[in-house]
Image (tube, grey):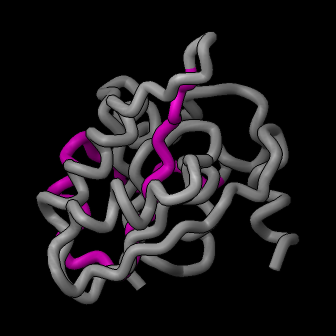
């Protein structure tokens, strides 16, 4: 299986590593060149996640649209920041979705793993994807600091 994980943060990078550790081909994507360079160099861009560094490097890029071409699976995990009034800032999320939509091809499954309001996948993500792309939502079920362990343990 060929996969791309979009947004290499505290959930996305461990998820990409877990996919790579199961003998699948994975490319990590992030808009932050520093994060991409660290991942390519085998360094963890954030502390306190056991087991990540031993599994690096993995391929990584800032060019999400190109990375998703030919992927069987794309997982989108950017942060959705909420302000003090409870209003979401959709810029990072929408940017990641738009980048994926530019390169993804029919037959690919695109999964949203960011915690988002009900209806986001159906009403905000799916309409941007080309025909024939399968879109799904999978809520985060892991805790920071033990993501790899949780991914390996939970069904």
Q: Is residue 35 magenta?
A: no
Please name the residue shown 19% across and 46% down the image: 63
The reply, left or right, for residue 117 in relation to residue 136 is right
Query: Is residue 10 something that shows in the picture?
Result: yes
Q: Nearer the viewer, residue 119 or 8?
A: 119
In x, y percent, where is residue 91?
Answer: 33, 30
The reply, left or right, for residue 121 in relation to residue 98 is right
Q: Residue 53's image quarter?
A: top right
Please name the residue shown 83% across and 60% down the image: 150
Q: Nearer the viewer, residue 45 or 54?
A: 45
The reply, left or right, for residue 67 in relation to residue 14 is left
Q: Nearer the viewer, residue 113 or 47?
A: 113
Please name the residue shown 52% across and 35% down the image: 79
**77 over 27 or under it: above or below:** above
Please name the residue shown 84% across and 59% down the image: 149
Query: Is residue 20 something that shows in the picture?
Result: no
Say which quadrant the C terminus sits in. bottom right
**67 over 85 or under it: above or below:** below
Q: Is residue 69 magenta?
A: yes
Magenta-colored span: 55-82
């Amino acid at each position: 299986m060929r996969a791309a994980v979009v947004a290499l943060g505290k959930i996305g990078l461990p998820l990409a590593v877990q996919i790579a550790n199961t003998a699948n081909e994975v490319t990590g994507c992030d808009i932050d060149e520093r994060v991409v360079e660290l991942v390519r160099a085998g360094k963890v861009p954030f502390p306190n996640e056991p087991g990540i560094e031993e599994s690096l490097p993995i391929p990584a890029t800032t060019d999400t649209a190109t990375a998703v071409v030919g992927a069987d699976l794309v997982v989108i995990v950017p942060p959705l920041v909420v302000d003090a009034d409870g209003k979401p800032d959709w810029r990072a999320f929408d940017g990641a979705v738009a980048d994926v939509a530019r390169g993804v091809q029919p037959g690919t499954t695109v999964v949203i793993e960011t915690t988002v309001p009900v209806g986001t996948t159906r009403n905000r993500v799916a309409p941007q994807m080309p025909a024939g792309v399968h879109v799904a939502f999978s809520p985060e079920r892991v805790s920071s600091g033990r993501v790899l362990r949780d991914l390996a343990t939970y069904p």
